[in-house]
Amino acid sequence: MNDRVGCREMELLCRHRAALDARQSWKWLGEADRWRDLAHREAAALRPEHPGPMAMGPNTIKGDHRNRAAEAQGRGSLRAHESPL
């Protein structure tokens, strides 16, 4: 069962068995937890991962601090779109 709905159905089935079988309810509740965790993992696999705040690297919005320091010292640096002519 690789789909979330199937995992949820198995979880509910195990919880129902736990209610009916008091002597082995620990076993059925454990199985229900396992199916619930599997359903959560299946749901997480369908969501795209959020890249996080450092996905773009350590540069700020205003640009790389090393380029600004070089420009301030008069050395200046050429950017990829600039021509030396």
Image (cartoon, grey):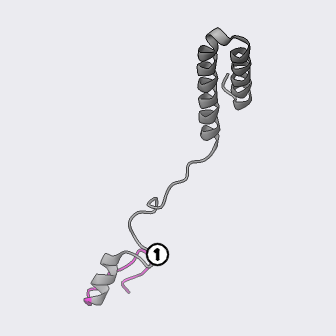
In percent of width and height, residue 60 lies at: 42, 73
Type of secondary structure dominating the magenta stretch: loop
Above or below residue 49? Residue 76 is below
In percent of width and height, residue 81 lies at: 45, 77
Front residue of 20/84: it is 20
Q: Which residue is mark 1?
A: 61
Q: Quadrant of residue 54?
A: bottom left
- For label 1, the SS is loop
Residue at screen point 59% across, 24% down: 34
Front residue of 23/28: it is 23
- Which segment did they paint magenta? 73-85
Residue at screen point 60% across, 47% down: 48
Image quarter hosting the N terminus: top right
- Which amino acid type is shown beneath numbered disc 1? Ile
Q: Residues within 10 Å of mark 1 (few under 14, many from 20)?
A: few
Above or below residue 40? Residue 15 is above
In percent of width and height, residue 62 lies at: 44, 79
**Residue 62 left/right relative to 72:** right
Front residue of 53/21: it is 21
Please say whether residue 77 is one of the residues in the magenta stretch. Answer: yes
Residue at screen point 65% across, 38% down: 43
